[in-house]
Image: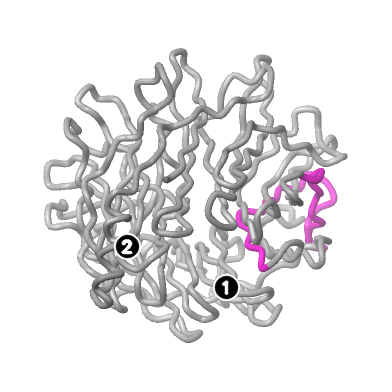
């Protein structure tokens, strides 16, 4: 499984507030509905029906790779239009793709209903692995196009991908990822690509901090843009001491700045192994990123970093739940574990180990600029623990104090189940098990609720996967109300 989470709410304008809280508290999800795959499809590859983006309530796109009966992997898109999820459609391959191109989607963005972008990579007929982008208009997808690599990439045996995309408007997007250069011993480098008025430009290399190793093994997994040409990308890189550092790269007015290593908490080890896996921005220069780092005591702790008015602050340790083990081994899945209703009012979700050695889900709130102690997710009746493949995977906060989370846990029979968690007036309620399509009994070790977006406190969309009565992973969709 995989996921993230949460945020809080005010107490003025009592009459209107009480009414809105009553709605939030009674928010109910539909039963999960199966995603019907194209003819010949057997199930989602490794349960990965996991990419979700929404323009506004009830207008979203989801994507994932699926297997055919002869073992070929294809990718589908599934559109939600005005609250109704449609059938899955095969995403085409670029004209130079191999027969079994392994086209994989890693990022999605929808600036307007029916207008979305997907990015990822695929294999060409010549054996190169290259990045691609695809766009939709009125919910119809164009043929994906290959993204031209920086000039120092090799002409053959290339290996590159776009990991995240953010679109300011239809046809105007930014994307980030990595590529290997043409050196005899290739180096992993960072790149950025831009779509302008519907045309994708050649990708350009990004400059890493001056202490980067010759082979920095850079990873850029998250991207958030407040407007066209004003973005932030986060991830990690290895410095010349072979220490993994938390990395941020800002784009200002269309120009990507030099990457910077973030200052860590005072208890960070000299070999902190820090990496950022979640990111969201409420406005230009005001962002939050989360990840993990190692302390001098050898524990793995949660890390949160705020950008305030364009300046990245020193990272802070997220305080683990009261029942956490001495080494909580905090973990984030890297899908959408952080969300903010406004600057200083955010929620984060992930996983930790408690004093019994069990895995549990955690939720952390930032309230008016102050990060609170994390709390343990209250599981449904009969649950034993979140499990190693459980915990919080997705978080969404449309309104301060009214957030939603998607998570997974182990039931009394030792099977993984998916659940949703609701926050009302700043308080997280007990999780509610997702009712799977008829005949399904669990989501398996690779399934769960992967994507969750609420555009208002009462309008939400979610996707995930579960095990069918055979051994295949099928996709599901959820809506609320």
Q: Can you give x and y, in whole percent of width and height, for residue 306 in the image?
A: 40, 76
Residue 395, magenta (yes or no): no
Give the number of callouts: 2
Q: Nearer the viewer, mark 2 or mark 1?
A: 2
The residues bearing labels 2 and 1 have C-alpha atoms spaced at a distance of 38 Å
**Disc 2, SS:** helix
Q: Please report whichever mark, 2 or 1, sits nearer to the chain's N-terminal start.
A: 2
- Residue 80 or residue 102, whichever sits in front: 80
Q: Can you give x and y, in whole percent of width and height, for residue 2 in the image?
A: 40, 44
| Image quadrant in which you'd find residue 45 | top right
**Pointer 2 with pointer 1, Cβ within 8 A:** no
| Direction from residue 200 to residue 349 in the image, left or right | left
Q: Can you give x and y, in whole percent of width and height, for residue 466 in the image?
A: 44, 27
- Residue 177 shows in the view: no
- Residue 51 shows in the view: yes
| Direction from residue 152 to residue 240 in the image, left or right | left
Q: Look at the image and tell me in which quarter the N terminus lies.
A: top left
- Residue 456 or residue 305, whichever sits in front: 456
Q: How is the image coloured?
A: one colour
Q: Can you give x and y, in whole percent of width and height, for residue 410 in the image?
A: 26, 32
**Disc 1, SS:** strand
Report which residue position mark 1 lands on.
249
Report which residue position mark 2 lands on.
20
Residues in magenta? 141-168
Picture residue at 17% right of the left edge, 30% below the top: 382
Picture residue at 43% right of the left edge, 67% below the top: 289
Picture residue at 32% right of the left edge, 31% below the top: 417
């Amino acid at each position: 499984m995989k996921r993230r989470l949460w945020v809080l709410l005010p107490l003025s304008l009592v009459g209107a507030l009480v009414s809105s809280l009553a709605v939030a508290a009674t928010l109910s999800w539909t039963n999960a509905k199966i995603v019907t795959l194209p003819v010949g499809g057997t199930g989602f590859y490794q349960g990965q029906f996991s990419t979700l983006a929404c323009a506004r309530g009830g207008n979203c796109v989801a994507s994932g790779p699926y297997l055919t009966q002869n073992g070929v992997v294809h990718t589908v898109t599934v559109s939600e239009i005005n609250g109704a999820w449609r059938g899955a459609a095969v995403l085409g391959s670029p004209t130079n793709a191999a027969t079994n191109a392994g086209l994989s989607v890693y990022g999605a963005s929808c600036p307007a209903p029916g207008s979305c972008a997907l990015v990822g990579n695929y294999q060409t007929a010549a054996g190169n692995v290259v990045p691609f982008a695809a766009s939709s208009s009125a919910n119809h997808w164009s043929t994906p196009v290959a993204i031209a690599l920086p000039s120092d990439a090799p002409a053959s045996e290339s290996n590159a991908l776009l990991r995240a995309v953010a679109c300011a408007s239809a046809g105007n997007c930014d994307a980030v990822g990595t590529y290997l250069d043409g050196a005899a011993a290739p180096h992993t480098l960072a790149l950025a690509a831009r779509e302008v008025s519907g045309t994708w430009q050649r990708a350009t290399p990004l400059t890493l901090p001056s202490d980067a190793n010759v082979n920095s093994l850079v990873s850029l997994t998250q991207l958030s843009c407040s407007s066209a040409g004003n973005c932030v990308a986060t991830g990690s890189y290895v410095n010349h001491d072979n220490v993994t550092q938390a990395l941020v790269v800002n784009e200002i007015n269309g120009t990507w700045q030099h990457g910077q290593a973030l200052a860590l908490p005072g208890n960070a080890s000299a070999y902190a192994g820090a990496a950022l896996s979640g990111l969201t921005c409420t406005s230009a220069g005001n962002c939050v990123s989360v990840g993990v780092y190692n302390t001098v005591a050898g524990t793995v702790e949660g890390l949160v970093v705020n950008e305030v008015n364009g300046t990245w602050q020193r990272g802070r340790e997220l305080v683990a739940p009261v029942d956490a083990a001495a080494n909580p081994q905090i973990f984030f899945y890297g899908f959408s574990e952080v969300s903010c209703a406004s600057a200083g009012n955010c929620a984060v979700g992930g996983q930790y180990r408690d004093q019994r050695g069990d895995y549990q889900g955690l939720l952390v709130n930032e309230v008016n600029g102050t990060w609170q102690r994390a709390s343990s997710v209250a599981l449904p009746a009969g649950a034993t623990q979140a499990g190693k493949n459980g915990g919080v995977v997705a978080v969404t906060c449309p309104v301060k104090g009214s957030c939603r989370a998607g998570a997974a846990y182990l039931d009394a029979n030792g099977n993984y189940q998916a659940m949703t968690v609701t926050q009302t007036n700043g308080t997280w309620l007990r999780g509610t098990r997702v009712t799977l399509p008829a005949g399904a009994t669990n989501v398996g070790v690779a399934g769960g609720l992967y994507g969750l977006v609420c555009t208002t406190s009462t309008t939400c969309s979610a996707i995930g996967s579960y095990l069918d009565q055979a051994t295949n992973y099928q996709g599901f969709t959820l809506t609320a109300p």
